[in-house]
Amino acid sequence: MPRLLSLNVGKPKDVPWQGRTVHTGIFKYPVDGPVMVRRLNIDGDGQGDLGGHGGENRAVLVYQRQSYEFWRGELGRDDLEYGQFGENFTVDGLPDDEVHIGDRYRIGEAEFEVTQPRVTCFRVGMRLGEPRIPALLVAHHRPGFYLRVIREGRVRAGDEIVRTRTGRHEMSVAAVDALLYLPGRDPADLRKAVDIPALSPGWLGSFRDLLAEDEHKAEQEPEAVAWTGFRDLRVSRVVPESTTVTSIHLTTPDGSPLPRPAPGQFLTLRVPGAGDPAPVRSYSLSAMPSDSEYRISVKRETPGAVSGFLHTRLAAGAILPVAAPRGDFVLADDDSPVLLISAGIGVTPVLAMLHALAAAGSTRDIRWLHTTHSAAEHAFAGEARKLLAGLPHAREYVRYTADTPPPGTPDTRRGRLDRATLSTLDLPVDATAYVCGPGGFMTATREALVGLGLAPGRVHSELFGALPAINPGIVGAVHATPHPPATPPGTGPQVTFARSGLSVPWSEDYPNVLEFAEACDVPTRWSCRSGVCQTCVTPVLSGEVGYEPGPLEDPPPGTTLVCCARPRSDLVLDL
């Protein structure tokens, strides 16, 4: 008969770790019972990162005595005590390969339901002083699992554990964990997993995404193969669009076709002559998607060595190394109303979307909303107005923040595209919105649109700067401008963080690209730090990496897991 051996609790606290502070509840210690188990927690317990732990579906974490014995042998450790893996219940029995998602158990006065495997994160490695442990838990099929509290009540060490119900499809904790984190997943198993009512919403959503991805791949027609790395393109024209914006037209030197981009994608360029090493920058494609010519449009920034070079020194005939079109901020092919919303130079990707809608003769309800400083800085005003005139259900709303619109532009007024303005425009709440502009503008616009009734999942935005960091549990972090590391300069391959505008030589002082980026104050995104969760997956624009250690599952083609990657050549990352 399975039995509860130890009941472990601990309140979250701030813990020093690698020069940072982590707010965590991973430190659990045995307590004498009986202890009350409630819907969200056990009395005396808490979680530091409620995004990944705790809550109704992760109220209680379970780990097994048999797994402790396994790890004592595997790691050569004799200091592993109950609670050290962060579990609330240390149990005798209930192995991960026999317990099913959806199983119910009675322990003492309370009843519980199995909802998901443990979420692998760096904190269990921090607690054990073994950074490999998140990957090892998955690789050895010993993750442990979470319980939902079905009936509250008191429990204590020594209570018997009685199974009262078996979960639908009888998919074990270990099998479900492997289905998410390991390669070779079976679509039939994915379909079973999404049909388990007890599975927590986060895991359910991940499996639905994987299933949709598999189905999408099966339905896709072969696409034109884009190039890898950087390819030389020729500047065919340089065209001023306003007092601050210039367009650069690019073709192949030999006139051969280009891969046709999706409306909303962007190009990443090396700009020789603008710095040493050559800076790397990304710019949206701003014209009708074409296989003969690309157009990017660049705003002159102050200061801005790269934009200044492109505006004043670039001429037709110049050669620029360019990475293939990419980006997920693309126009969806559906019939819903569409809102194209931009501020300043953020107009470029939504202008490409407008071109695509006009070329298709779209009958969708289309709203074009743009704000800029003044008429002199209003790039593409005539171009957009001409495209809108050819669409039967299109309307335009333009706002100048510091200028009175010229006569003959009834859709243009002085003002801002803020919540107050948007609320007067009778925008369709079933629309899909595409928003591009400065970060503050996109955040405020998203909040306004959701507040006006649009579904959050239908509001899309494009961000060219560094992506928001995902550093779970880290508190008090100071955000600095990216810079070379404080350690002596490395002698290895050049590593370029494209979004952060930084290029530095690799140093063997660092075990992986993630820690190198952190030393440069480049914003990073991670959770497990051991090649499991793929939170750190990053597009590779050029170059090759090796892995030490290898990830449990290779990332998608053209990407890398920076938490365990090391450069084998000069490397350009979308980071």
Image: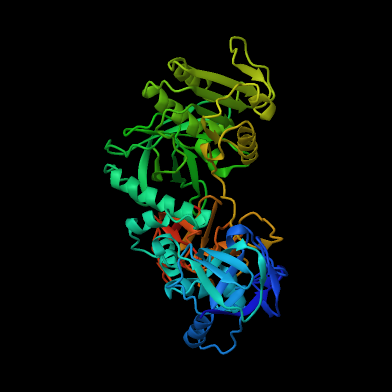
| 449 with respect to 507 (left or right) | right
Rendered image quadrant of residue 46: bottom right
375 vs 24, nearest the viewer: 24
Is 1 left, or right, of 159 in this rendering? left
Q: Identify the residue at horizontal 47%, vertical 58% (top origin).
A: 537
Where is residue 505 drawn, in percent x and y? 51, 63
Q: Is residue 413 above or below residue 130?
A: above
Residue 131 location (% of width, % of height):
54, 75
Q: Nearer the viewer, residue 29 or 401?
A: 29
Q: Is residue 534 above or below residue 70?
A: above
Quarter-of-image position of residue 248: top left
Work out whether 64 lies above or below 373.
Answer: below
Q: Residue furthest top?
A: 408
Is residue 232 among the parts visible in the rendering?
yes
Q: Tell me what residue is drawn at x 49 percent, y 71 percent.
A: 143
Given residues 494 and 175, the one toward you in this image is 175
Across and down, in percent, residue 519 comes to 60, 64
Would you say residue 545 is visible in this rendering?
no
List x then y, in percent, for residue 562: 48, 62
